[in-house]
Amino acid sequence: PFNVNSLALAAACAAVKDTEYLEEGRRLNESGMLQLQEGFRELGLGWIPSKGNFICVDLGQVAAPVFQGLLREGVIVRPVANYGMPNHLR
């Protein structure tokens, strides 16, 4: 949902060349993903496994009210009802 400007593009190009930075990013992503999965497990929620920097969680109910509540708190997630998954957020 966000446009990429030329400064962000230049930063991304520099970051790709920094293998130490990339490895740290991979490690942090994996750690965060494990933390999210453990939280979902404790809450009894399902999710779609992901190797990316996002995860799609099944809330077990229509996700739109949760999406709106998170947005009011400044937490940006993506509803995926338009993909036929009204109970999921990504």
Image (cartoon, helix red, strand yellow):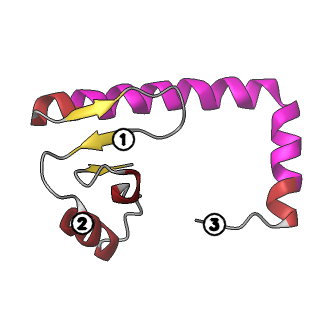
What kind of element bears circle 2? helix
Up the image or down, 36 lies above or below 26; here it is: below
Picture coordinates of residue 28, whole percent (x, y)? 52, 30
- What's the magenta bit mostly, secondary-structure-wise? helix
What residue do we see at 88% from left, 32% from top?
17
Crowd band around label 1 with a 10 angstrom C-alpha radius: few (<14), some (14–19), many (20+): some
Q: Which mark is residue 4?
A: none
Picture coordinates of residue 15, whole percent (x, y)? 81, 40
The furthest residue to the front: 84
Spatial distance from mark 3 to mark 2, Cα to Cα? 20 Å
Picture coordinates of residue 36, whole percent (x, y)? 31, 35
Q: Is residue 77 left or right of residue 22?
A: left
Q: Is residue 41 left or right of residue 18?
A: left
Q: Which mark is residue 64?
A: 2
The answer to which of marks 2 and 1 sits earlier in the sequence is 1
Q: Which residues are magenta?
A: 10-38
Query: What amino acid is found at the position of numbered circle 3 in the picture?
Result: Phe
The furthest residue to the bottom: 72
Where is mark 1, residue-wise?
Answer: 56
Where is mark 3, residue-wise?
Answer: 2
Q: Is residue 14 magenta?
A: yes
Picture coordinates of residue 56, whole percent (x, y)? 36, 41
Query: What amino acid is found at the position of numbered circle 2 in the picture?
Result: Ala
What residue do we see at 44% from left, 26% from top?
31
In-front residue for pair 26/69: 69
Crowd band around label 3 with a 10 angstrom C-alpha radius: few (<14), some (14–19), many (20+): few
Query: What amino acid is found at the position of numbered circle 1 in the picture?
Result: Cys
- The reply to whether the C-beta atoms of the residues labelled 3 and 2 are less than 8 Å apart is no
Q: Quadrant of residue 26?
A: top right
What kind of element bears circle 1? strand
Q: Quadrant of residue 66?
A: bottom left
The answer to which of marks 3 and 1 sits earlier in the sequence is 3
